[in-house]
Image (cartoon, coloured by chain):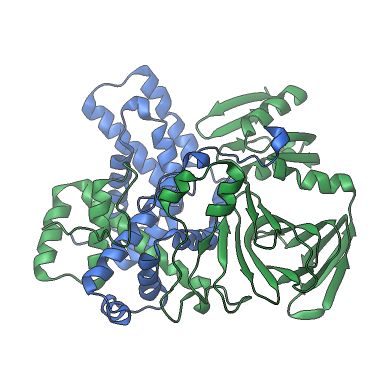
Amino acid sequence: MTPEFETDDAPGPQGATENAIDVKSALWAARLDRGLSAAETAELGAWTAADVRHRGALARAQAAFAYLDRAKALGPNFAPGAAPQVENPVRPSRRRLLTGGMAAAAAVGGVAFGPRLYTRFFSGEPPQLYTSKKGEIKLVSLTDESVLTLNTHSLVAVNYTGERRGVELMDGEVMFAVAKDQARPFSVLAGELEVRAVGTSFVVRNMAGLPPEVLVQEGMVDVVYRAQPTSLVRAGANTRVTGESGARLIKASVSPDTVARETAWRQGMIAFEGVSLRTAAAEFSRYSDTRIVIDDAAIANTTITGLFQANNPAGFSQAVAGSLGLKVERGAGFVRLYSE
Amino acid sequence: MTGVSQDRAAWLARHVLPHEAALRAWLRQKYTLGVEVDDIVQETYAILAGLESVEAIRNPRSYAFQTAHSLILAHLRRSKIVSIRSASDLELAGAMADTPTPEQVAADRDELANVARVLSDLPPKVREVILLRRVQGLSQRETAERLGITENSVEKRISQGIRALLAAFGRGGKRAVNPLRSDEGPENGEPWRRRDKDSE
């Protein structure tokens, strides 16, 4: 007997690409998780013996299930005490009707998590989760007319109450254009850092391996380590605040040009001024799966300046090669810069 | 054989699944060879699952690529048609396999965020089961009792969660069709979403 998947709570496979063996092996992996009856053991033995691909697909499905262990790292609050009540507001059929990038991004970006998932910062209502994919920039309009611009591969949770407006930047980089509302302060949590604003625009970065950073474009914000109230720093326009270890905040003035350059991603561009090709290549890797490969250290250390399309590492490499007298080799998933 | 051990499943989850999208991307470029990507991927997993020990494998990514590479060669030998083009395509195998990349580093550090993304994309009924079973650590039976549904439903929802995860790993976070939810409207087909009117 071939068990059917429930159709009431999840649409069946809609991508014609899903492999039939994968469907079956996912079911077997789920059964293995609860333990097999003798009859099932025999059935599975026959199935895996029939085709090497069945064995591989089953191992892969079991690996996927094992991978979910990592969800535990999201913290004890991640598990809802009660079953999540929140219906996903996104239905595929509705998505198709939406046209226009902006409206679509704003309307369909939200994915409601169950309650108590991100209570580190929030309480009460479940936060809305917004994500952007690699190479994607997404605009999110919030109910108070504040606008978030998500840079490539970012993840934010938004939680508004009558008293305050809260956003947690869990990963990536987001520009906040905050609508003025004195009665409801707007705060952004990025790692251990909290940024408070009334009405202003600023960029927050929170990427693993790098210190969290706030770049103020307009208005005034307070930045503070939550565990260290005395760390509070007030920052005006054209200021950068960087969170250092030991709950220390470093404030530095930057030129309007720098602000413009570092927010160029909002137009789908990356701007460099005097950065090494190595750094530039790493920056491009945030936006594209095509790698820029530079084997020669001398070349990698060469500094460059310019404004480039973020999603076009090959074009960037061509431009760099042209101006530095280098050669370009294009291969599968990479572009190599070298000299003869 | 009735599945791999928990240890091996965990090893595959940690060291191979995260590289699967790159492996598939590389295999897709071998279309001139008539390679069936799904077949090669499944056979690669079968080989990795069947290894007596994985302790000696220093670079699992490289190992997986090499395994896939040898499988392609085996297929080619069987089909007895190796064009000149095919041979030169295959030379890339070494190059692709041994390159630790910035994306790899990025992928590692983003792993937690990726789990959150995948979970957030699951249908709510599938998600609640996955969370109870995998995060709270209830058994399938306890999960069924907690939710007041049959064990059979729990099992099916877990398998749906696994499928969603497999699809996510297959596409490596890039645009693709989620088997459980067709998210990709025409407006999502573009890698960029321009926001400025004057740039259009």
Residue at 43% from the left image edge and 28% from the top image edge:
B91
Q: Position of residue A338 (x, y in %)?
A: 66, 28
Q: Residue at 35% of width from left, 50% of height from top? A: B179
Q: Is residue B121 visible?
A: yes
Which of the pair A120/A218 is nearer the observer? A218
Q: Quadrant of residue A299?
A: top right
Residue at 55% x, 53% y is: A107
User: Which chain is depicted green?
Assistant: A
- In the rendered image, the vertical position of residue B54 relative to residue B129, given as above or below: above
Q: Is residue A248 left or right of residue B98?
A: right
Q: Colour of chain B?
A: blue
Q: Position of residue A266 (x, y in %)?
A: 71, 45
Figure quadrant of the C terminus of chain A: top right
Q: For residue B53, say whether it is visible.
A: no
Side (left or right) of A108 relative to A149: left
The x, y position of residue A86, in whole percent, is 46, 70
* Residue B22 percent location from the top left of the image: 46, 43
Q: Is residue A37 above or below residue B49?
A: below
Q: Nearer the viewer, residue A259 or B15?
A: A259
Q: Quadrant of the N terminus of chain A?
A: bottom left
